[in-house]
């Protein structure tokens, strides 16, 4: 051992913390088949304030006979565990890690097959091997370190914390006991083990042969890798352990326990080999199929619930935020499932949202029900429950992110199909940006005239005749009064069918079918045309018809035909 002094130094300094040696010793005990590992500490006072700190690791595994001691315990880089996926210590350096604590001595007592041995390693890493007459079951390791009671307390606390980090999900029972507590109060051994679980939304557990996965949606995800329950790596830095998969899992936290995983020689990360890729494929399947399925199930149940409180609103926003971050392929696969709540309590699918946008160029959204939104929904125009603009950080602000992303990608997907069909680039002026609009920004309360003054009726009738003559596509032209004049009153409202609530311009009027229009009889321009109508009715009618087409920005090439129709 003394000949390898420099090599041992290089090995022990690779660990992030000297106390990580207790992970190594627990791992060796598990590999030896011990049903329990007991870690305990005690302080032995000396002549002055410096005493001896004894750190014990006891197991009841297979133990060692003389051949194993000579071949493995006292030789570096020799291990019987190669190519055995049931054992996770691969490099024969687990025991060497105890020297990271700079011990005064390390005592190993072990027995196997009727042989019982004691090996004492000295401070200079030389050792003595002695046969014992007293039976020893398994292996008992004691690390002796010099220090005062304060140093002892620090070590006891540190060992407990490192065991919790590395061994919390161990498949073998592990306990820790401080037998010389600085408080003087003796406590029962502390269980290190805790359930293999994770916190977050839509917590999902999936088991495969040799692999167990727990995953959940998390705003700040963490990633844990385990073999036999011992931690191989735990981090929030996804790129360090996931590589190119980090982008897919930026909103998904997980813990994966698999016999296919192992750490590198330095114990600082996961070994990227064929077994790692096999485990990652299982993880991807669990996330894309099981976790995503749980997200859909929770969303469907939530949107179907009639009465919502603050908790439901918050949960809805969180779930949609995670849905918005999922790959487009997954969103497309569920586009027909009603997941988006309206103010009326009805749920719409992503496909329905896209179809409404395709027909209207916008989707209505509001955070609270009102008279206008109620009237619109009664008339068949949905109003999505959500917020926009400065309130994007509202609990349900994620509705915007989801709908805008899906509509944009869905439209690009459709355009891509056209590109393949025509083998050339097809430009488009349609915008998918900021199409979520408040009803108040789109619709005006309109009172259609059941009766109107004779001059108003005459002017409108003549304008309607001109539009009909040139086949402008208006089925009906009437007069109206806009109930709420916000200082920016419009001259016309146009729709497939006139109603008590009409869209502000620019409304989409390029859909199939003939249109209906109403002229605002209180608008200054219309009042001016009424005056002209008194002396030149044909000119006034032509100007009114022309104004409608200008407002709609359509059929402007019919100007000469309209002039001729006005003179007829």
Image (cartoon, rainbow, N blue to C red):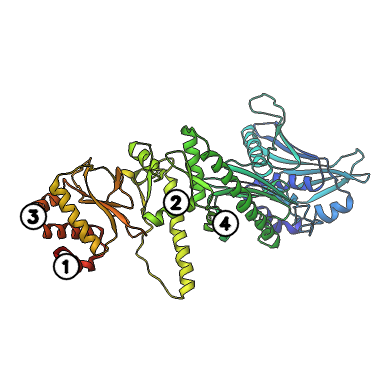
Residue at image position (35%, 39%) is 375
**Mark 3 or mark 4: which comes first in sequence?**
4
**Mark 1 or mark 2: which comes first in sequence?**
2
Which label was assigned to residue 532? 3
Q: Mark 1: few, some, or many residues within 10 Å (few <14, many ≥20)?
A: few
SS type, badge 2:
helix
SS type, badge 3:
helix
Residue 340, percent across and down? 48, 45
502 up-or-down from 311: above or below: below
Query: Do residues under tags 3 and 4 come within 8 Å of each other at their CB atoms?
Result: no
Quick check: can you spot residue 356?
yes
**Mark 4 or mark 2: which comes first in sequence?**
4
**Mark 4 or mark 1: which comes first in sequence?**
4
Residue 447, percent across and down? 25, 41
Residue 380, percent across and down? 40, 45
The mark lying in front, picked from 1 and 2, is 1
Residue 539, percent across and down? 11, 60
Quick check: can you spot residue 442?
no
Q: Mark 4: few, some, or many residues within 10 Å (few <14, many ≥20)?
A: few
The mark lying in front, picked from 4 and 2, is 2
Q: Mark 3: few, some, or many residues within 10 Å (few <14, many ≥20)?
A: some
Location of the C terminus (image quadrant): bottom left
Side of 509 relative to 532 (left or right): right
Which label was assigned to residue 549? none
Q: Nearer the viewer, residue 25 or 87?
A: 87
Residue that label 2 marks? 353
Q: Nearer the viewer, residue 494 or 91?
A: 494
Distance (Cα) linking label 1 and label 3: 19 Å
Residue that label 1 marks? 564
Residue that label 4 marks? 240
**Mark 1 or mark 3: which comes first in sequence?**
3
């Amino acid at each position: 051992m003394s000949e390898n002094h420099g090599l041992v130094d290089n090995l022990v300094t690779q660990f992030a913390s000297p106390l990580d040696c207790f992970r190594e010793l627990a791992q060796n005990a598990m590999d030896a088949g011990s049903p329990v590992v007991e870690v305990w500490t005690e302080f032995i006072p000396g002549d002055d304030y410096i005493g001896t700190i004894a750190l014990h690791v006891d197991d009841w595994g297979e133990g060692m006979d003389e051949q194993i001691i000579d071949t493995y315990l006292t030789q570096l880089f020799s291990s019987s565990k190669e190519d055995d996926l049931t054992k996770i210590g691969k490099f024969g350096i687990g025991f060497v890690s105890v020297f990271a604590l700079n011990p005064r001595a390390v005592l190993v007592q072990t027995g196997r097959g009727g042989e019982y041995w004691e090996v004492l390693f000295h401070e200079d890493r030389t050792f003595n091997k002695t046969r014992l007459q007293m039976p020893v079951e398994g292996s008992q390791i004691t690390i002796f370190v010099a220090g005062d009671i304060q140093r002892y307390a620090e070590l006891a606390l540190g060992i407990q914390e490192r065991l919790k980090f590395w061994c919390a999900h161990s498949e073998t029972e592990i306990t820790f006991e401080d037998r010389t507590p600085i408080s003087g109060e003796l406590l029962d051994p502390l269980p290190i083990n805790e359930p293999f679980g994770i916190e977050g939304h839509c917590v999902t557990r999936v088991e495969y042969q040799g692999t167990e996965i727990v995953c959940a949606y998390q705003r700040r995800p963490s990633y844990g890798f385990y073999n036999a329950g011992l931690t191989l790596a735990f981090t929030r830095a996804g790129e360090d352990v996931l590589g190119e998969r980090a982008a897919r899992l930026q909103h998904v936290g997980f813990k994966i326990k698999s016999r296919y995983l192992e750490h590198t020689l330095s114990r600082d990360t996961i070994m990227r080999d064929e077994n790692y890729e096999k485990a990652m494929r299982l993880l991807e399947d669990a996330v894309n199929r099981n976790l995503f399925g749980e997200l859909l199930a929770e969303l469907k149940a939530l949107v179907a619930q009639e009465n919502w409180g603050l908790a439901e609103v918050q949960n809805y926003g969180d779930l949609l935020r995670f849905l918005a971050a999922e790959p487009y392929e997954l969103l497309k696969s569920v586009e027909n499932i009603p997941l988006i709540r309206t103010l009326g309590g009805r749920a719409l699918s992503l496909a329905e949202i896209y179809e409404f946008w395709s027909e209207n160029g916008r989707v209505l959204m509001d955070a609270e029900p009102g008279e206008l939104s109620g009237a619109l929904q009664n008339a068949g125009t949905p109003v999505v429950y959500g917020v926009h603009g400065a309130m994007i950080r509202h609990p349900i602000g994620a509705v915007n992110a989801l709908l805008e992303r899906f509509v944009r990608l869905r439209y690009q997907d459709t355009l891509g199909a056209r590109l393949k069909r025509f083998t050339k680039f097809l430009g488009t002026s349609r915008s998918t940006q900021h199409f979520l609009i408040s009803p108040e920004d789109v619709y005006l309360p309109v009172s259609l005239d059941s009766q109107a003054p004779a001059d108003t009726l005459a002017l409108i009738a003549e304008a309607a005749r001109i539009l009909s003559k040139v086949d402008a596509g208006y089925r009906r032209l009437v007069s109206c009064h806009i109930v709420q004049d916000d200082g920016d009153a419009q001259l016309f409202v146009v729709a497939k069918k006139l109603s008590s609530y009409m869209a502000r311009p620019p409304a989409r009027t390029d859909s199939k079918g003939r249109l209906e229009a109403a002229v605002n009889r209180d608008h200054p321009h219309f009042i001016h045309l009424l005056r002209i109508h008194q002396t030149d009715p044909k000119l006034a009618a032509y100007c009114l018809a022309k104004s409608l087409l200008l407002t709609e920005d359509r059929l402007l090439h019919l100007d000469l035909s309209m002039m001729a129709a006005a003179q007829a």
